[in-house]
Image: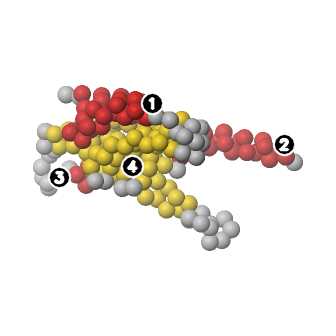
Amino acid sequence: MMFNLSVKCFYFILASFFLVSCSSTRSITERYIKTEIEDHKIGKTKSSTIHLVYQTSLALGNDYIELAGFIDDDQKKLTIAGDKIYKYRSSFKGDPTTLRQVAFINLNEGECELILKNYKGMFKRIKDSKAKSSKEVVYEDLTVNEDLFVSFSKHRVQGIRFSIWMYGEKYTIGGKKFYESLKDFVDLD
């Protein structure tokens, strides 16, 4: 009986992996930029370019973050979209109720450059820091604007992590890939 349950769990995990890996590319920033930021006038054409900077699923598919750059009035801007899915406490057995929260924030080129300018120094300081116990977490934060800060954290067991905090919600992502992707976007002509 135990073996049968283990096999079923293995197949469930394997099927979940294939479903996530075969799913189509999400583009929640595209929808937001095209419908909330760009100004469309009846009878007028408009040219625009959106550059997908970074995207990743987090925490076994419950969280998703995407960064897309665009040019607006000849200025580079970056939209960050964070998509979190929360499972409500069940009201009854098998209750599938979930809450989906999607947040968007826009950064100007100066705010992107601020992150790039401070990233390596923050990483060095967090790398050199020491957590005093297994229950302590050390942080190195950079406030980008009133709604966003980026953060390195270090824990004795989990090691170093990089997070984007939008409107008080934390999205832990791959820091090196994020840095390189953001740098590529800022360096675009």
Residue pointed to by mark 4: 165
Tell me the residue at 33%/43% (across/down). 142
Tell me which colouring the rendered structure shows: secondary structure
Residue pointed to by mark 1: 128
The kind of residue on which mark 3 rests is: Asp
Q: Which SS class for mark 4?
A: strand
Give me the disc on residue 3. Answer: 2
Q: Quick one: 178 or 123, which is closer to the camera? A: 123
- Whichever of labels 2 and 1 marks the residue nearer the N terminus, that label is 2
Q: Which SS class for mark 3?
A: loop
Q: Which SS class for mark 1?
A: helix
Horizontal side of residue 100 vs 119, given as left or right:
right
Residue pointed to by mark 3: 39
Q: How far apart are marks 4 and 1 (CA)?
A: 23 Å
Q: How many marks?
A: 4
Picture coordinates of residue 27, whole percent (x, y): 38, 45
